[in-house]
Image: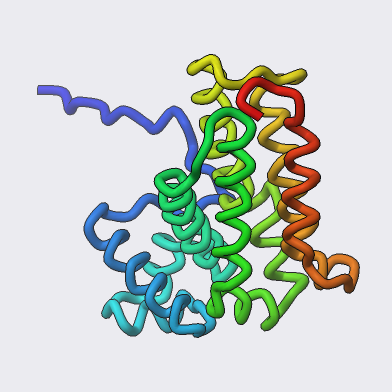
Amino acid sequence: MPRRAHKRRLIPRSGGAPARAPAGRAIDGLALARRRFLDGERLSPERLAGELGISRATAYRRFGNAEQLAGEVIARLAEDTFRRTAQEARGRGAERVVDQLTRGMRYIASNRAYRAFLERDPQKALWIVTSKAGPVQARVIALNEALLEEEIARGNLRLPVDAHTMAYALVRIVEAFLYADMITGEKPDLEKATQILSLMLRGQPGG
């Protein structure tokens, strides 16, 4: 009988993203990387490979290079922080959005491990957390877009632009003030950031 032809992959894997790993092992590796990050250590696929008992090539396929690994760990920490602030935020509409963003800024600014990461190599760190090439900024924008859409759906908020554009603008304001010491040499002023965030949403229902 003729052999059955194997179907070829029609969609090539993106060269910029790490290869998909078996779910359990990938999660274990990222959990370990997260612990190392929170301990203030520099993340390294090579070290992770040794701790997981896998080859370096396998570690790079699963987690990417050091920048990609750090980006994924920070993106997941950002998601955790967002969920925490979502539970704590008060008010509705613009008030709730600003309160949640302000709480998030304070948690980030007070995280010693994160500050150590930023101060170790400021230029590279900023690229990881604020570049569209990494997962951090895109995920944070998506989370805030969902928050805005939730308040709009509840009738608590109206925006002069679409939710995605506003979420992008809000996140960029947060980045500008949160990382002011590395961008302009000025001391981060989170109170001014909150004031500007409020002005951007001022006059909307719930504000």
Figure disc tally: 0
The quarter of the image holding the C terminus is: top right
- Tell me which corner region of the image, top left, top right, bottom left or bottom right, holds residue 203: top right
Quadrant (top left/top right/bottom left/bottom right) for the N terminus: top left
Which x, y percent locates residue 28? 27, 66
Q: Which picture quadrant has residue 152?
A: top right
Residue found at x 63% / y 68%:
109
Name the residue at 31% across, 28% down: 7
Name which residue lies at 47% across and 31% down. Answer: 11
Q: Position of residue 57 (x, y in %)?
A: 42, 70
Instruction: Depth check: give the residue in front, 189 or 56.
Output: 189
Residue 190's x, y, as percent? 73, 60
Say left or right for 192 vs 163: right
**Frontmost residue, 118 versus 200:** 200
Image height of 206 relative to 37, above or below: above
Q: Residue at x 50, y 16 (%)?
A: 153
- Which residue is at the front of the view, 197 or 55? 197
Q: How is the image coloured?
A: rainbow
Which quadrant holds residue 67?
bottom right
- In screen coordinates, is 204 left or right of 183? left
* Residue 48 location (% of width, % of height): 39, 78
